[in-house]
Image: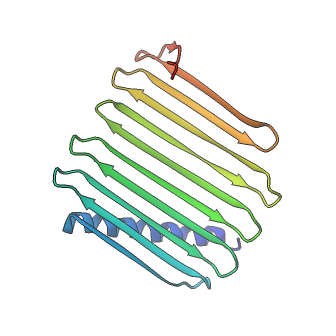
Amino acid sequence: MTGTSSFSRKLLLASAIAMGLVTMVQVAEAGGRAHGARPNAAGGVTAAGGAAHQGPNGGKVARGRVVATDGNGNAATVSGGAFQTPSGAKGARAGATTVNADGTVKHESGGAVTGPNGSASSQGGFTRNADGTVSGGRTSNATGANGNSAQSTSTYDSTNGYSRNTTCSDAAGNTIACPSR
């Protein structure tokens, strides 16, 4: 995509603005939705939407998405969301995807959650090249309330296939056997 970095920066800025609007709606009204679309300077369309709600017991949720095209067959989207429960658990996720006219795709996403039973996070992405080859990976971490944790890394590529490595540790950092399902 020609001018990808500029296009991506504009998209990220638009996403941040949309998420800020969602947060303001949440604070001001304890809930609401907003969405819209308009032509953009790149010859395409930019659309944004978001929602935020607060429940009667104090739980909160907000989400937003921005999609932009450039009129040449390229598109990009950024989305994000967050929640908080009445008991204080909270989490958030975000992702970004670009699809180019030549068939290439790039996606990155991640999220995290924390609460009284522990915490977890995951981040990763993939790329599809114009020739159809694919590669990607994801790293995930989880820690229980007792301090035991698991770290897992997975990778995939069209040549070598899929692989995953998981390591578990106790609260002191010693390697332990990972629990079975």
Query: Please, is residue 152 above or below residue 26 in the view?
Result: above
Answer with left or right where residue 139 lies relative to residue 86. right
Residue 8 location, quadrant? bottom right
User: What residue is shown at x 42% (from left), y 66% (from top)?
Assistant: 16
Residue 177 position within the rendered picture, expressed as x and y whole percent measured from the top left = 53, 14
Q: Nearer the viewer, residue 7 or 91?
A: 91
Residue 65 position within the rendered picture, expressed as x and y whole percent measured from the top left = 46, 66
Q: Nearer the viewer, residue 102 or 59?
A: 59
User: What residue is shown at x 34% (from left), y 20% (from top)?
Assistant: 146
Residue 110 position within the rendered picture, expressed as x and y whole percent measured from the top left = 50, 48
Q: Quadrant of the N terminus?
A: bottom right
Residue 145 location, quadrant? top left
Residue 87 location, quadrant? top left
User: What residue is shown at x 33% (from left), y 59% (from top)?
Assistant: 62
User: What residue is shown at x 71% (from left), y 74% (from top)?
Assistant: 2
Answer with left or right where residue 104 lies relative to residue 95. right
Number of marks drawn: 0
Q: Residue furthest left?
A: 56
Query: Please, is residue 72 above or below residue 170 in the view?
Result: below
Q: How is the image coloured?
A: rainbow
Query: Please, is residue 38 above or below residue 135 in the view?
Result: below
